[in-house]
């Protein structure tokens, strides 16, 4: 019965007029309308340094260095960065954290709940609103007051962005003793 109705509709001739209007985006989102770049599928490069690798340690500083991919531009106020830590890790309520790289008034503003292992935030610029982070942009920030996971196994912290949706991870192992200022490089994606 559905096929008969479909056939009847295609045999009728109905004049249709379609007007295509140009897409008008605000200047801060104009880069979304370009069709010269492929859809981003790249991932960021990542390095993580912890002020302590002691399992369960509170008040640990996570210094995170990453570079957005060649297609990884993030719009001010819209582009997001997500850090996913090992099970048992707890991020505090961080508010806005000033990026140390680029050192140009850019902030990562956390909008996740305190006490979770996933911290998502958006990029915000105070000095030049409308600009976010560029593609292939080196970024560094320090998340202070993190509680390490209590697990004594290899752990990984990953980062993804709203443009670079493939997460990149950095691996480290927590210890029972005192270990400070140790870094972990990118181990894969």
Image (cartoon, grey):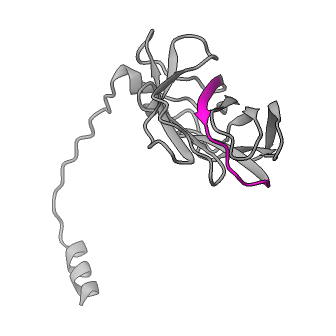
Name the foreground residue: 62 vs 132: 62
**Looking at the image, is 72 positioned above or below residue 177?**
above
Can residue 144 be found in the magenta stretch? yes
Name the foreground residue: 68 vs 150: 150
Q: Quadrant of residue 138?
A: top right
Q: Can residue 60 be spotted in the picture? A: yes
Q: Is residue 37 left or right of residue 124?
A: right
**Looking at the image, is 55 positioned above or below residue 77?**
below
Q: Quadrant of residue 101?
A: top right
Q: Is residue 36 left or right of residue 77?
A: right
**Residue at 43% in and 13% down:** 126
* Residue 164 drawn at (x, y percent): 60, 40
Can residue 67 be found in the magenta stretch? no
* Residue 102 drawn at (x, y percent): 62, 15
Name the foreground residue: 136 vs 67: 67
Most extreme residue toward the front is 177
Q: Is residue 115 left or right of residue 11?
A: right
Q: Can residue 49 be spotted in the picture? A: no
Q: The N terminus lies in which quarter of the figure?
A: bottom left
**Residue at 73% in and 54% down:** 151
**Residue at 58% in and 23% down:** 134
- Report the span colored magenta: 140-153
**Looking at the image, is 46 positioned above or below residue 26?**
below
* Residue 104 drawn at (x, y percent): 55, 10
């Amino acid at each position: 019965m559905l096929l008969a109705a479909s056939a009847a509709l295609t045999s009728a001739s109905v004049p249709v007029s379609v007007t295509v209007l140009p897409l008008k985006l605000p200047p801060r989102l104009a880069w979304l309308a370009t069709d010269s770049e492929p859809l981003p599928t790249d991932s960021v490069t990542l390095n993580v340094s912890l002020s302590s690798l002691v399992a369960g340690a509170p008040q640990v500083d996570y210094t995170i260095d990453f570079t957005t991919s060649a297609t990884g531009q993030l719009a001010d106020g819209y582009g997001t960065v997500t850090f996913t830590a090992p099970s048992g890790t707890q991020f505090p309520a961080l508010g806005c954290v000033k990026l140390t790289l680029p050192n140009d008034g850019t902030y990562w503003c956390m909008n996740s709940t305190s006490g979770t292992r996933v911290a998502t935030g958006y990029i915000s610029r105070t000095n030049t609103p409308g600009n976010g982070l560029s593609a292939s942009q080196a970024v560094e920030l320090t998340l202070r007051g993190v509680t390490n996971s209590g697990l004594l196994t290899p752990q990984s912290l990953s980062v993804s962005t709203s443009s670079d949706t493939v997460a990149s991870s950095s691996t480290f192992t927590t210890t029972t003793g005192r270990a400070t200022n140790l870094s972990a490089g990118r181990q894969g994606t």
